[in-house]
Amino acid sequence: MKISKRAEYGLMAMVCLTKNKKTISIREISNIEVIPYEFLAKIFAKLESAKLVKAKHGANGGYVLTKASNKISVNDIISALEGNKKTVDCVCCQRKTKCLAKDVWAKLEKSLNKTLEQVKLSDLIK
Amino acid sequence: MKISKRAEYGLMAMVCLTKNKKTISIREISNIEVIPYEFLAKIFAKLESAKLVKAKHGANGGYVLTKASNKISVNDIISALEGNKKTVDCVCCQRKTKCLAKDVWAKLEKSLNKTLEQVKLSDLIK
DNA sequence: GCATATCCGACCAATTTAGTCGGATATGCT
DNA sequence: AGCATATCCGACTAAATTGGTCGGATATGC
């Protein structure tokens, strides 16, 4: 039950992006936040395919947010970066044994999403 | 952001224990729930040191709950079994960079605990 | 056309997770 | 007492995941 470095770095980078407003390159973010460059590049690839950021190739290029920072939630970012969507894929369910444990995991995931949904990027730069 | 098999099996086993009321051996639970015996034994070792179950050695031995099933929450079980207490140990905090991300993780953990705390073992056998 | 960017996939090392094995210890039953 | 049945305990291992690296292709501004 741990958040990955990928997600953690991703959030840091997104906050960094929010602060800057302008296009900023991975190289710069990598320097500012002390995140391994290549790793950060992969993170941004995912953020882009989730349409949270937009790339600009070539010199003076980099990334910008696609939306206003108060329209992007932490949940958007985490879900884009965490590979495993489900917190549990319940073994007992696969077995067709009636099991209320499933409901616990569903509830857990729901409350998790809700909590992260409430926090917007704009809340993190104050 | 995934619950471990250890925790999942642990919850299943605890539900099993709740249903039975009497002392039941790991071997039996292992058969009923189709959980590898040796692995389950290790899970129960942890549950015991968290004082959620009590062991009885020797023939006709096994485990029993130490408390009423409505006094044991899913959170008790999960925390006993999940090694990593913190969902994130924030890199930016170690760097003394002011960072509001930390608050997000704290909030996340809090809501997680709260959600799991609300569900008692007794709720899962209805 | 060159420097600066993103893009993309293969690769790798360290850690964690899930599971195994062997044996010690405790206890009920005949 | 002796045996079967339990928990207990630590070392070990295989597979998966995570965090990170490398090389090169593609796009763009100056």
Image (cartoon, coloured by chain):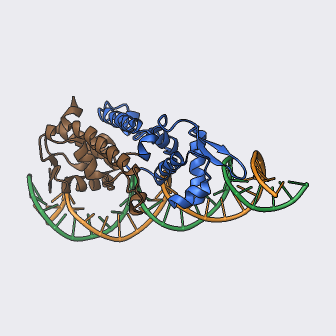
Chain colours: A brown, B blue, C orange, D green
Residue A97 position within the rendered picture, expressed as x and y whole percent measured from the top left:
42, 59
Q: Closest to the observer: A87 or B14?
A: B14
Position of A80 with respect to A68 (left or right) is right
> What percent of the width, then of the height, locates residue B38?
60, 58
Q: Is residue A39 left or right of residue C8?
A: right
Quadrant in the picture for residue A112:
top left
Name the residue rendered at 38%, 53% in the picture: A88
Q: Nearer the viewer, residue B76 or B61?
A: B61
Q: Is residue A57 left or right of residue B119?
A: left
- Residue A24 image position (x, y, % from top left): 18, 45
Q: Nearer the viewer, residue B36 or B62?
A: B62
Q: Residue at x 18, y 39 (%)?
A: A18
Rendering quarter of residue B65: top right
The answer to whether D20 is drawn above or below residue B108 in the figure is: below
Q: How many numbered marks appear?
A: 0
What residue lies at 45% left-to-right and 41% top-to-bottom?
B122
Point 56% across, 39% down: residue: B52
Give how far across and how far down residue B96 sits, in percent: 37, 31
Q: Could one spot residue B104 in this view of the protein?
A: yes
Q: Is residue A28 visible?
A: no
